[in-house]
Amino acid sequence: MTEPRAAAGRGGGFDLAALLAERGGERYELHARHLNHQLPRMLRTIGFDKVYVRAEGAHFWDAEGNDYLDMLAGFGVMGLGRHHPVVRRALHDVLDADLADLTRFDCQPLPGLLAEKLLSHSPHLDRVFFGNSGTEAVETALKFARYATGRPRILYCDHAFHGLTTGSLSVNGEGGFRDGFAPLLPDTKIALGDLAALERELRRGDVAAFVVEPIQGKGVHAAPPGFLRAAQELLHRHKALLIADEVQTGLGRTGDFYAYQNEPGVEPDLVCVAKALSGGYVPVGATLGKDWIFQKVYSSMDRVLVHSASFGSNAQAMAAGLAVLHVMEDEEVVANARAMGDLLRGRLAALVDEYEMLHEVRGRGLMIGIEFGRPSSLGLRGRWAMLQAARKGLFAQMVVVPLLNRHRILTQVSGDHLEVIKLIPPLIVDEADVDRFVAAFREVMDEAHGGGSLMWDFGRTLVKQAVGNR
């Protein structure tokens, strides 16, 4: 018989709270010594080297008790915010259940239940493969498309981001991520929205699929109206597949359960999800697809393990995913994302005429891009030119830093060499959070356009840093 849980002690003497109390203050030194040494260096350079000690919902707090508003959501992972009580309870429950998990030679109920729930939001799809991340979900889709069609080539979009493992990197449209990692798979890039280029490549007869983000994370650019439907028709006419990468846009982010659902008639052959499905706790990725694709890949018992993942379908990830989907339905999270997104985007768009360096506000739901551009007045043009000469993207960084350091709001620049801030807050933000962000953004814009010395002094610091890194 197993030892009763109460008599098992505290993990054989391991005390996590004591370890964090003793060593938590070394966090930046530990990273510099043992992990990516450029991360703490970068955070210190831009003043982001904070010490956060607690988080809940769309907020976190530092050791002094200061409250920060999260407009980044862990790059979209924290769709429900941090430590949602329903997801947290589900994880306690699944751990306490002592399930015989990952035996590899049985069929546990939780993966089937989560697949069933996901597919209920995707009625034209039939089956699910569970992995551990967004890039793994994309890798699965690429493999399945190649095998099911018998063709080698994948088409993707310029500026796309589909992950950083080798297959996903091969369809990554941003050169900075690809540099130095060749040779990659021989796939082909087209511009988002370019149907002529898509058709030209399809005529060669070797295309397995076209993978696309309905709204690109880099720069927050949406596919033009009608593009996804027209692309789907072209692909199917040429016996190729449409892969929708919904790793960031899916699960309510854009005000629909999937971003592709904004365009009637679009029914991708394969759909990739991850990030928010985790509840912010346990990594999980999922590739949803049509039955005939799965039937081809798993065509016999000899091929039963031809594509698998060691930690795929683990009980903790499945429980988290089920809890996330329950909360999304119970708390009407998708509707909130749509309403708060419309409110935030509308209030920011109204500022475009007030600030000459604010050029456009775009996006859908709670995926919003704020783009800056060259001002018209002579004095501001000189300062803008100084930043652009050093490195494109520095003005956006100048906005992000005071938003954090003075207003305690965490945001991000949307990509390297872009003058775009991307807002992807937790989907549970409310009107008070919108008010807080807009008020803070106004103050930062007022200072930037009024020639505030603190902001432009920091701009000169960024220029020196950019020049020094050349």
Image (tube, grey):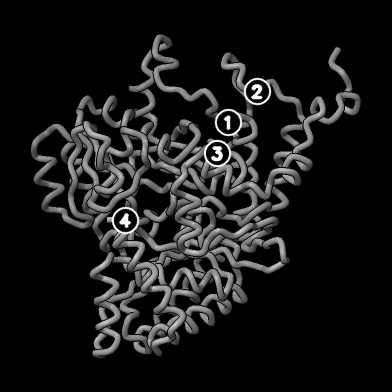
- Please tell me whether mark 4 or mark 2 is closer to you in this view: 4
Of the numbered discs 1 and 4, the one sitting upstream in the chain is 1
* Label whose residue precedes the other's in the sequence (1 or 2): 2
Looking at the rendered structure, the kind of residue marked 3 is Pro
Q: Which residue is mark 1?
A: 111
Say which mark, if any, is on residue 469.
4
Counting from the top left corner in percent of width and height, residue 361 is at 37, 74
* Residue at which label 2 appears: 101
Identify which residue, 268 or 337, lies in the foreground: 337
At which x and y percent is residue 244? Answer: 35, 46
> Which amino acid, mark 4?
Asn
In the picture as drawn, the residue positioned furthest to the top comes out as: 302
Residue 228 in the image, given as x and y percentages of width and height: 27, 53
Residue at image point 33% right, 38% down: 168
Residue at x-position 39% and y-position 42%: 271
- Sequence-first tag of 1 and 3: 1
Residue that mark 3 sits on: 283
Q: CA distance from mark 1 to mark 4?
A: 48 Å
How far apart in space, not on screen, are marks 1 and 2 (Cα)? Answer: 11 Å
Q: Earlier in the sequence, mark 4 or mark 3?
A: 3
How far separated are the C-alphas under marks 1 and 3? 14 Å
Report whether 265 appears left or right of 320.
Answer: left
Does dot 4 land on a helix, a strand or a loop?
loop
Above or below 459: residue 220 = above
Residue 449 appears anywhere in the view: yes
Q: Identity of the amino acid at label 1?
A: Pro
* The N terminus: image quadrant: top right
Q: Secondary structure at mark 1?
A: helix
Quadrant of res 7? top right
Q: Is residue 334 visible?
A: no
